Amino acid sequence: MRLFIGLPLPAAARQRLAGLGGGLPGARWVEARNMHVTLRFIGEVDGARGEDISAALAAVRCPGFELSLGGLGCFNRGRRVHAVWAGVDKSEALAHLRKKVESAVVRAGFEADRHKFKPHVTLARLKRTPTAKIGLFLEAHGGFCAGPFPIERFTLFRSYLNPGGAQYEALADYPLAGE
């Protein structure tokens, strides 16, 4: 199974983000119910390793916090833009949670993540979208902001890849309360 750890967003935040959808040819927009902030991508694991991760995550102790979203940007692969995202405002509490989650994943026997943590919410995946259209979209919506909103839990998700886009299933929720 393909796993990742993320922050589910409150419905009001997901609706605000979904309101940005449209206006980009070749964009496959993320459904509002699938919008989240990824804390750590794990990848393909068997059932036993998934249980190891879940047990390690259950031991994470971290207080809840508030999070705000601000600004839009894009990720490139070579010369092509492949995704448009909404940014997450700098948050020491989020960085602290990410560090604890990463430590738990390593304790469960996985290699440390070598990627720099860039918190964001993916809005759309792009295919052959003209660069000029992407620039206009980012310019038109660059002032986007939402929040603050409470973050009270993090979740272990299973990801199913389908031709119409990924679907996510919450396998376990971990409440944020105290250290």
Image (cartoon, rainbow, N blue to C red):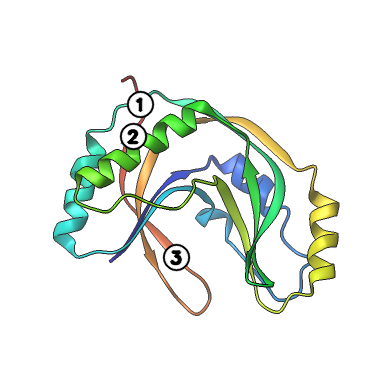
- For residue 165, the mark is none
Left of 79 or right of it: where is 149? left
Question: Mark 3 falls on what kind of element?
Answer: strand
| Residue for point 39% across, 23% down | 63
Residue of label 2 = 100
N-term mark: 1 or 2? 1
Could you tell me if the residues under marks 1 and 2 are in contact, i.e. CB atoms within 8 Å? yes
- For residue 62, the mark is 1
| Residue for point 71% across, 76% down | 26
Estimate the x, y position of residue 105 in percent, counting from the top left: 27, 46
Estimate the x, y position of residue 7 in percent, counting from the top left: 45, 43
Distance from the alpha carbon under mark 3 to that under mark 2 = 26 Å
Residue of label 3 = 167
- Kind of residue indicated by mark 2: Lys
Q: Quadrant of the C terminus?
A: top left
Between tags 3 and 1, which lies in front?
1
- Kind of residue indicated by mark 3: Gln
Question: Mark 1 falls on what kind of element?
Answer: loop
